[in-house]
Image (cartoon, coloured by chain):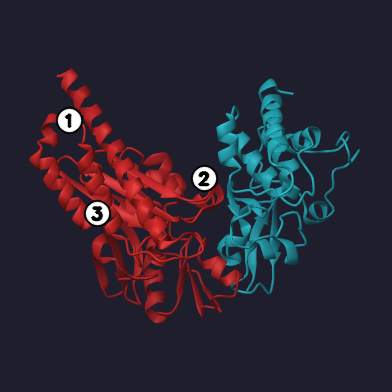
Amino acid sequence: MDFLRPASWEEALAAKAEHPTAVPIAGGTDVMVEINFDHRRPEYLLDLNRIGDLYEWEVGEESVRLGASVPYTRIMENLRAELPGLALASHTVASPQIRNRGGVGGNLGTASPAGDAHPALLAAGAEVEVESVRGSRRIPIDEFYTGVKRNALAADELIRAVHVKKADGPQQFSKVGTRNAMVIAVCAFGIALHPETRTVRTGIGSAAPTPVRARAAEEFLDAALEEGGFWDNGKIITPSVAKQFAELCSAACNPIDDVRGTASYRRHAVGVMARRTLTWTWESYRGTRRTSEGAA
Amino acid sequence: MRVNFTVNGRPQEADDVWEGESLLYVLRERLGLPGSKNACEQGECGSCTVRLDGVPVCSCLVAAGQVQGREVVTVEGLADYAKQRAEGGCATGACGSAGTSLDEAKGWQAKGDSQTGEGGELSPIQQAFMDAGAVQCGFCTPGLLVAADEMLERNPNPTDADIREALSGNLCRCTGYEKIMDAVRLAAARQSEGV
């Protein structure tokens, strides 16, 4: 095994081009487990810890450019207003020790369906900035996950940052596990209300071969909210609408039975989380509407 | 490969390090510092918690090559680290003579009475663990000490929820955590009273 220690992003890209099988390591919270247990013996480890750029973030007009290695702890502390869904999801990652090392770049690189960041990224809307010596491109999050632990990266590409749309409305994240810490999601659900476009986006984790959106549920809810004038009148969501939304979210799952839970449990739990998080976000939306009307 | 880094305030060099080796392995097997414990090797248990550039991490998940040029504090250096911090000095050792030498660290033990800790040089959190009876088999203790000490540095007046969250990455299979909670509360109270 060789340990490659590029001092700059350009050096990292050159190393990855020269050794496409090199395994990038940043926080190490996935890669080191595989090495410790002898599940993986990469020919090259490509250490990204020296590349300071990957630990920075910028808050822009429309979106946040989040460096691939920004630890979850930093996201929780600094980006709760701009990226509330991702901040909530970050807080459910493992433990303080792991959150101090791991970041969204690793979640995307591993592309496990159980990665905690994915539902939040899908719901918020995001693009993954990847680069190789051939050039840079942005992959929409909806096209990023291509299979179980597979993503749209080419062999010579590295993840540099993820551009996440700033929240224009309430967001929530919910996760089922056996305790509040150190838990791989049995299943997870993210939701983001987008009042500016009068749309709702979702993300489901650990209940299909890849993280997925519940598109039929989103379309149903968008239409129901529009039809009832909900965005304007700020009424309570009709229970039948919430129920139908939950059922469509369950239907978007394609889960398996495994040690953490059965397929039918996952489907059921995703429906429950969908209904709850819709209620939480909608109540929050109604609250901000009342406040802004009261102030006006 | 060779790795040069700072351990408990003193520069150290580890040779013949395998590229896939963890920081934990280097600390225990190459530098002879067995205080950080090796249990799960997957970041679940927190027994191997050390400070890396001040930040608590699982040393089993840090590749040895990643610590080149960086600063690590282990449980063996905790007493000195806390002392330096209390004196307003430089606890990491980057500024001179402070720190714990490898020989001191290897031979580190609670001096004085091993039951009460009296007469020894312990960090306040170590003393509080002894006073509160927060140690049974002791395997999880080093990780808990490092994690709890860091929390008290950051958050001198923690709520019970703060303590539980800060220690949520450290598993203990003996005590049921109540005595550990007592110990951290005790250390926090002593810290705020300046005892």
Residue A248 badge: 3
Comes first in the chain, label 2 or label 1: 2
Closer to the camera in the image, A189 or A94: A189
Label 3: state its secondary structure: helix
Which chain comes out red in the rendered image?
A: A
Chain of the residue under the numbered disc 1 shown in the image: A
Residue at 21 percent across and 57 percent down: it is A215
Residue B135 versus residue B119: which sits nearer the camera? B135
Write the residue at 74% across / 23% down.
B195
Residue at which label 1 appears: A235
| Kind of residue sitting beneath label 2 | Asn
| In front of the other: A225 or A62 | A225
Q: Quadrant of residue B156?
A: top right
Q: Find residue B173 and report its horizontal and vertical position in percent.
A: 71, 49
**Dot 3 amino acid type:** Leu
Circle 1 SS class: loop
Measuring from the top left, give residue A205's x and y in whole percent.
37, 57
